[in-house]
Every structure is written in C-alpha cells, then in structure tokens.
Amino acid sequence: MRRKILFWGLGFLGLGLFAYVLAIAGPGDVLKNIRAIGIKGFAAAAAVVSFSVLSWNLSWQSLLRAFGARVPWGRTLGAIVAGFAISYITPSAYMGGEPVRVMLVSSSTVPATMVTATVIVERMLGTLSMLIFASLGGFFVLLSPKVPLFDKKVLVVGLGILFLSVLVAFFLLARKVRVVSRLFGRLGKSFPRVRFFGRAERALREVEDSAALLFNRPMYTLLALVFQALGAFCYYIRPQVFFGVGLGEWFTFPQLSIYYSLNAVLSAFFWITPAGMGIAEGGKLGILRMVGIGADKALAYILVFRFLELLEVGCGIYYLLQRGLDVLGRQRISPLKALAPEDGGEKEAWRGSPPRPPEAQEVGRQRTREDREKRQP
C-alpha cells in the first residue's frame, strides 16, 4: 500500500513539474518547433534511437556467444525492449528491468545463472561506455563559465562515484571475490531455518563464477564493449540529430559534450519519478539553456525523443503481454527466486559444457519434493 502511495505521489509530482516546464516554454512555440523538424528530422531521430537498441542487442549477443549460447536474435531484442520498458517507468535510474530480461531469455538450455551473468556484465560495460563519453564532457563543463559551480561539483562527485563503482565491480568479478554470495552464506548460517539463503548463495556463486569466465574470453567482452560504445554514441549525437538535421542548428563538440555529461548525471541520480516525468524535462531544459538553446526548442527536442522512447516502452509492454508476464504489478518479479527456485530446479552455470538436461532437472525436483514430504510431521 505504501509503495502504491509513493508511486502515485511521485507521479503527480512529475505531472506538476512537467506542466510547469511546459508553461515556461510555451505550448504554441514548442509545437511550432516540433513541426519545424519535418519528416527528415523525425526520421533521423527515430533512426538513432533504433540503432542504439540494435547496438545493445549486439552487445548482449556477443556475451551470450562467449558461453556458446545460441539465443534467437528476436528473443534478446524483445527482452531488451521489455527490460527497458520496466526500467523506464520505474523510478530507478534506468535500472530495474534486468530480472525481466533474465526470465525472458533463460530456458532449459540457457541457464538463468549464465544469463544473469551476461546481463550484469552488459550493464557494467554500458556504464563504462557512458562514463567514457561523459568524461569528455566533464572537461568542458569544468572550463565553461556558463555552468554554475554547484553543477560542476555534482558532476565531479557523480562521475567519480560511478567510475569507482564500475572499477570495484570489475575487480571483484575478475578476481572471483564472491562478495554477494558470501553475504547470503553468512545469512544462511545466522538463520539456518531460512533455506532461501542457502539456495540464493549457491545460485549467486554460479552467477559470479559465470561472470568471471567472461574475462577469460576478452575478444567477446571487447566486442560487447564496442557495441555498447556505439549505443552511447547514439545518445551522444541526439542533440546534433534534432537541432542539426531537423532545425539546421549544429552543435559544437563542447556543446554536445557538456549536454551529455550533465544529462548522464541527471539520469543516474535524479530519475525519481515514474518515467522521469517532470524531472527529465526540467533538468534537460536547464542543461540545454546552458549551451545556448531556448526553452521552446529545448522542450521540443525533449518531447520528440520522449515520444520515441514511449513507443519503445509500448513495444516492450506488448512483448511482455505476449509472453504472458504481468506488467501491472499483480505478479512480483524476484530475481533471486528466479535463480534459486523452491522446487529444486536450480540451473547450473555454463562452464563450457551443456547444462543438465530437462530429465535431470525433473529428478532434482522430485527429490526435493520427497525430502519435503519426509520433513512434514
């Protein structure tokens, strides 16, 4: 109940902020600028959004191929779009849809632990790619007299936290320092009656070991990083596509870099309303005004890409409904329960040999059910 109240409260807050930003920019002027980009500008914007999604798909496919997994391209693409939809509408800084991706791709021949490892590494590579482009902009932000001192401090601290987090995560995975699984192991020893901790420890250990294997296959990981960088580049040139192709106002390299770096911090730490409504519009409008773009043109740019992103969200929700998952909150998605099911059907990590066949998994489930019946009084 509290979660619903918080969600709707943040939703109304976002609507209020959006209405305020729209009033500042002027609805008529915003609409005029949207029409001014024409079909060519809109098509270019749609193309850059589509190419970024394809780049993410290629990156994930590269990591899956590192384990020898052959997952249909349509399934990974659908899972990426569905995961994006969940992350987009959740106040979680573009995170939250990863468990959905794991559930949609994993199967009897593609273990959930292996898929989880690829998703974790793919997200880490995506963050690293974003930080590379954001660091370019950070240099110009620090030198720009138009950027307030407070914004400069927020940028330095935000990027520093993200860089440190990614480096620590890479180090822990590469050296097989099982921090998370050990934590659940200690919880299992402290609470022996809670058997979930033991199952979660085993599953998470397999996830950590599978993720570490990717560092032993650097060509696949490097290829995934290249595709992630292409996706980040698509985000980087979004203003150039809209203002340059659509309105004939081309950005300079410092303008693009300043917008990208500040927007990266905005999306990472201030995405607190559903779909970032109000927060994203207000923050991006303020950043674009720093680089010399008027409020009406800035909001037109924001709304065009907001519309394209909502189309992607709609495709993701449709794919979820087609796959039979409930996206309205009636069915909670737990990543740990997906990795460590109660019926004993844990899926083994991919270690270069095929996972257990379905018959062996069924035997494990049967043994678990028999043990459970014996323990009952």
Image (spheres, rainbow, N blue to C red):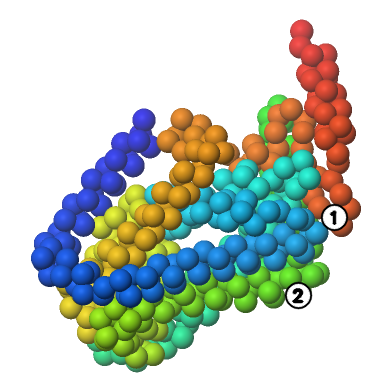
Residue 59 relative to residue 31: left or right: right
* Residue at horizontal 56 percent and vertical 39 percent from the top: 323
* Residue at horizontal 61 percent and vertical 69 percent from the top: 125
Q: Quadrant of residue 214?
A: bottom right
Q: Is residue 239 visible?
A: no
- Report the mark closest to the observer, 1 or 2: 2
Residue 88 relative to residue 76: left or right: left
Tag 1, which secondary structure? loop
Q: Quadrant of the N terminus?
A: top left
Q: Which residue is mark 1?
A: 351
Q: Which residue is mark 2?
A: 219
Q: Position of residue 329 (x, y in %)?
A: 44, 35
Q: Position of residue 269 (x, y in %)?
A: 40, 62
Name the amino acid, label 1.
Arg
Question: Which of the marked residues, 1 or 2, is nearer the chain's N terminus?
Answer: 2
Tag 2, which secondary structure? helix
Q: Position of residue 206 (x, y in %)?
A: 77, 50
Name the amino acid, label 2.
Met
Contact (Cβ within 8 Å) of mark 1 with mark 2: no
Task: Give the vertical position of 1 relative to 323 (above or below).
Answer: above
Q: CA distance from mark 1 to mark 2?
A: 18 Å
